[in-house]
Amino acid sequence: MASKGHSDTDSGRLPPAPAYSKEVPPGHNAVYPVPTVVPPPPSYLTPSAPPVHTMMPASLGPHNVVYPAHANPGFPPPGYVTPSAPPMMPAPFGHPNAVYPSPTNPGIPPVPPGYVPPPVPAMMPAPPPDLRPTGCPPGLEYLIHVDQLLVHQTFHLAELLGWEVRNSYNVKNSIGQQVFLAEEENNCCTLQCFGPSRPFTFHIQDNLGQEVLTLTRPLACSYCCFPCCLQDLEVQSPPGIPIGYVVQECHPFLPKLTVLNERRQPQLRIKGPLFFCSCCRDVTFEVKTLDDSMLIGHISKQWSGFLREAYTDADNFGIVFPMDLDVKMKAVLLGACFLIDFLYFEERKGDKKH
């Protein structure tokens, strides 16, 4: 038997299931047959479940008990008035739960009905900070950083015919870059009748077209023999505000000019040569202190060539001054250059005085 069972196990086959037996009590590995389900007849109607309110309550205790829902009488009942909260007793001062009433502001009156608040005025933008050095007129900031200027008079073809025209000048720096443009304002009658002694107004503009200097010269005698009506040039910057003057001095031999500030106080003196000739050389006017003890600069009329000097009045000038000189005095020396040109070098063709 042992060898047989061992052989069955080795072959991999399972023993057959035991046959159904009525002697096997229920629950002890019993095998029950599958019950046969009999379908209801075709005319059978499945009864509907009774409504919840008609169901009979089961006795307390068994499972699957269904209880009817409780009716909610509503809360609060109709007509119920919620009692108001009792007034709160103030807590003692300094208590952490103390509640203090907000104080009333007696300083703000109540707004009357129909009050319309006034419109808020438009806020003016703050002006930009003035970055110019103290005392520097607007538009002359460039003169602070230079110690030399070149003045070139513009050539006009009408001068070859002896016709006097309005003068114009290009003011350049030491490397030939244009800094200012000067234009004379005058009429034809004044130009032809008074010649170099004519009154004039010069408008000097920067490279942006803004007028930064205005030079005015009234009609006066150009000879020193009349000391009561000598030349007087006014320099304005901005236009309408004087910043200095150039006044001709009475001297029988030497050409002399005095540079004044805006209060007509003497500041510098300009002195020309005793006998000067503009042929083939430069003519220099020295700029000195009032006591003639120190030379601080010069204004020189430069030789422009034989043909240009002989047939035209177009002249070239050079102005040299200290770098730290007041910018207003630099502008006045520029005006003095124009006055020197009209006094000593502005001549018609065939009417040379030197």
Image (cartoon, helix red, strand yellow):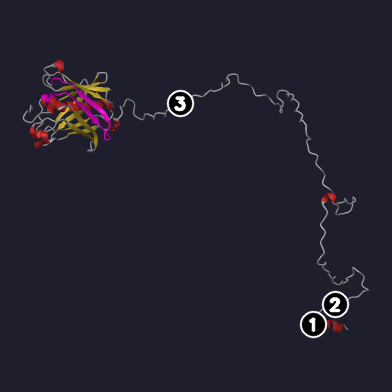
Specify which label sits upstream in the sequence, 2 or 1: 1
Kindly identify the residue that appears in the image at 21 percent across and 24 percent down. Answer: 216
**Residue 202 among those drawn in magenta:** yes
The three-letter amino acid code for the residue at tag 1 is Ser
Where the N terminus falls, by quadrant?
bottom right
Label 1 belongs to which residue?
11
Asked where in the image residue 354 lies, by quadrant, the reply is: top left
Farthest residue, direction front: 43
Farthest residue, direction right: 23
Dot 1 falls on a residue whose secondary structure is: helix
Asked where in the image residue 336 lies, by quadrant, the reply is: top left
Asked where in the image residue 203 lies, by quadrant, the reply is: top left
The three-letter amino acid code for the residue at tag 2 is Ala
The residues bearing labels 2 and 1 have C-alpha atoms spaced at a distance of: 18 Å
The crowding category of the residue bearing disc 2, from other C-alpha atoms within 10 Å (few below 14, some 14 to 19, many at least 20), is: few
Q: What is the span of residues highlighted in magenta in the rendered image?
A: 193-221
Label 2 belongs to which residue?
17
Q: Left of 177 or right of it: where is 250?
A: left
Residue 280 visible in the snapshot: no
For discs 2 and 1, the disc positioned in front in the rendered view: 2
The residues bearing labels 3 and 2 have C-alpha atoms spaced at a distance of: 108 Å
Farthest residue, direction left: 350
